[in-house]
Image (cartoon, rainbow, N blue to C red):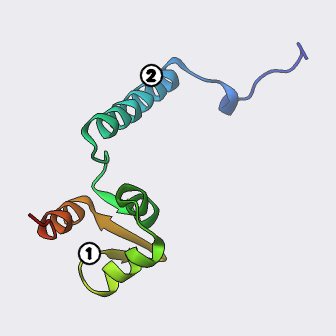
């Protein structure tokens, strides 16, 4: 194995490692923010994330969409929800 010379695309440069470090640090910051603030680290959430966040079933999420209670955006086969719309819906339906 000592006679094998790595090709150009197999060599990791110092700048590659710096970029990897920065990407990992950004992801770590997003995870920490999400854990401590209770808010997701991103604006747009997919259906699975919304169901987990609210603790609801797929059918209930579907009924929220169908009734117009929770706005959504559909791109291709994926449905996205704005986090602010979710918090607004929760506040608007809050009982005293």
Outermost front residue = 96
Name which residue lies at 29% across and 34% down. 36
Q: Residues within 10 Å of mark 2 (few under 14, many from 20)?
A: few
Q: Is residue 39 left or right of residue 3?
A: left
Q: Is residue 80 above or below residue 9?
A: below
Residue 70, horizontal then vertical, whole percent = 26, 75
Which mark identifies residue 18? 2
Name which residue lies at 45% across and 78% down. 59
Residue 46, horizontal then vertical, whole percent = 41, 63
Name which residue lies at 31% across and 50% down. 42
Residue nearest the viewer, comparing 43 with 14: 43
| Residue topped by disc 1 | 70
Which element type, helix, strand or loop, lies under badge 2? helix
Residue 7, horizontal then vertical, whole percent = 73, 29
Q: Image quarter for residue 96?
A: bottom left
Q: Is residue 49 above or below residue 4?
A: below
């Amino acid at each position: 194995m000592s006679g094998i010379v790595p090709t150009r695309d197999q060599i990791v440069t110092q700048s590659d490692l710096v970029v990897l470090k920065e990407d990992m640090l950004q992801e770590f910051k997003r995870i920490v923010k999400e854990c401590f603030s209770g808010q997701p680290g991103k604006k747009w959430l997919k259906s699975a994330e919304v169901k987990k966040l609210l603790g609801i079933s797929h059918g209930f999420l579907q009924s929220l969409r169908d009734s117009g209670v929770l706005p959504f955006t559909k791109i291709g086969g994926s449905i996205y929800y704005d986090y602010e719309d979710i918090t607004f819906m929760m506040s608007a339906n809050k009982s005293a």
